[in-house]
Image (spheres, helix red, strand yellow):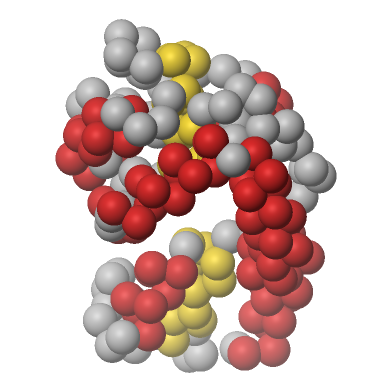
Amino acid sequence: MNILTWHVHGSWTSAFIRGGHDFWDNSRARTRVIEHGVPDPGHLCTGEPARAGVVVNEPVRRTRVAGTDLLPRFAGRVPLDVFGMKVAGLPYGAYEDLPQHVMHAAPARRRAYLHPYRCTSPGPALVETMHAFVTDPERAAQAGKAARAAAPARYGLPRFLKDRDRLPAEV
């Protein structure tokens, strides 16, 4: 029997599986990882307010893994707005469980986005870059324009659908 098991995950999972480690027990079945694809909502960033947006669910319960223990360090340099489930009570701007269409647009308006999860290992360079973006809107706009130009090739929905549609030929 020829079976292909496929997973939709981010690049860290893809690297983990390709590295010879079985994240899931798939027995003898071949495994393929396809990175997430997202529809492009278009240009949403206005750079106002001059704050960093953070999206994290249950930041109090998941402190270390979600990187929320790092937020005071960032907040010392850049004002933060935290979006997600169970964010009320944090000492930053807190936006609790917004409807999805609002959730996508609200953090995108901020001048910078912070992803504090441990797997990304935020270091001093990230703190300085965020500070630079918040204090220099032109620099932030240039970086955002470059990111918008590069992102569709890796994260766009058309790329995901193309990769997904190629799977039947591999079986």
Give percent across and percent down for residue 127. Answer: 36, 46
Residue placed furthest toward the top = 89
Left or right: 9 in relation to 26: right
Quarter in which the C terminus is drawn: bottom right
Left or right: 138 in relation to 66: right
Taking the image as drawn, is residue 116 in sight?
yes
Which one is nearer the viewer's eye here, 48 or 32? Answer: 48
Badge count = 0
Give percent across and percent down for residue 1. Answer: 48, 90
* Residue drawn where x is 44% and y is 81% of the image: 31
Which one is nearer the viewer's eye here, 68 or 3? Answer: 68
Which one is nearer the viewer's eye here, 167 or 159? Answer: 159
Left or right: 30 in relation to 38: left
Give percent across and percent down for residue 93. Answer: 44, 15
Q: Which corner quadrant of the image does residue 35 belong to?
A: bottom right
Give percent across and percent down for residue 7. Answer: 48, 67
Q: Which corner quadrant of the image does residue 153 belong to?
A: bottom right
* Residue drawn where x is 53% and y is 36% of the image: 134
* Residue drawn where x is 67% and y is 32% of the image: 47
Taking the image as drawn, is residue 108 in sight?
no
**As displayed, is residue 94 above or below residue 119?**
above
Which one is nearer the viewer's eye here, 6 or 39? Answer: 39
* Residue drawn where x is 63% and y is 49% of the image: 139
